[in-house]
Amino acid sequence: MVTSTWARIENATVAEVTNIDPQYRFPPSLVWITCPDGTLPGMQYTDGIFTEKHEAPIDHAAQIASVRYQHETAGITVNAVSIDTTRDSQALITAAALSAVIDPTYLCVWKALNGPVTLTAAQIIEIATAIRAHVQACFDRECQLLKALAEGTYTADMLDHGWPAVQGA
C-alpha cells in the first residue's frame, strides 16, 4: 500500500506535515504538496523530520575511466576477424604474438568472436598490433577527457564522442 505524506509550504519552507489528506480540512489558501512515500523533491522525510537531501557529486574521472574500459573491451574487427579485446584476450593475443615473432611459421586456431579461424604468424602480429593501437587510443581519449576535466572545459556530452572506431570493420 502506497502511503502519502502532505507538506504545507509557507515561505518556501515546510511548515507542517501530515499523513491525513488536507484537501477538505484547511482553507484553500494554504499550499500543500503531496509527497508519495514520504518524499519531497530535494528533501528526505525520516522519523517525522524533513531534511535536505544531498546528492553525491558525480565522480567524472571514474565515469570517464568506466566508459574507456567499455570501449577498450568492446572488441575490434581486423580483416573480417572479430576479436575480443577483454583484458584476458589481450593477454592471450600478446602471448600468441610472441610465439609468432619467435617462429614465423607459427600457426594457430583462434577462437574469434565470429568463429574459429586459423591464423598465420603474420596475421597474429597484425591483430596484436591492431588491438594494441585500439587500446592505446582508448587510453589517449581518456587522457584527453581527464585533461578537459582538470581545465574545467569538460562537458558530459564529450563522453559520447572521440573514442576509437572499430578497426577494419
Image (cartoon, rainbow, N blue to C red):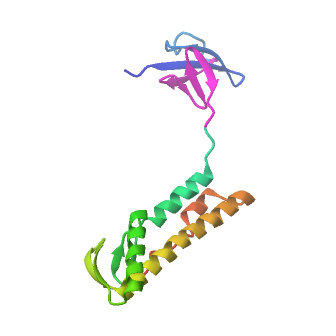
* Residue 167 shown in magenta: no
User: Where 150 falls versus 26 (above or below)?
Assistant: below
Residue toward you, 167 or 98: 98
Q: Horizontal and vertical percent for residue 83?
A: 36, 73
Q: Decide if residue 78 is in sight here.
A: no
Q: Which residue is farthest right?
A: 151
Left of 115 or right of it: where is 25? right
Q: Residue at x 69, y 63 (%)?
A: 147
Which image quadrant: the N terminus? top left
User: Where 85 falls versus 117 (above or below)?
Assistant: above
* Residue range corresponding to the magenta coloring: 29-55
Left of 62 or right of it: where is 94? left
Q: Horizontal and vertical percent for residue 44?
A: 57, 25
Which image quadrant: the C terminus? bottom left
Q: Decide if residue 44 is in sight here.
A: yes
Q: Horizontal and vertical percent for residue 99?
A: 38, 80
Residue toward you, 144 or 154: 144
Q: Residue at x 58, y 11 (%)?
A: 26
Q: Horizontal and vertical percent for residue 86?
A: 41, 64
Left of 50 or right of it: where is 90? left
Q: Residue at x 63, y 23 (%)?
A: 51
Q: Which residue is farthest front?
A: 102
* Residue 44 shown in magenta: yes
Q: Residue at x 61, y 37 (%)?
A: 55
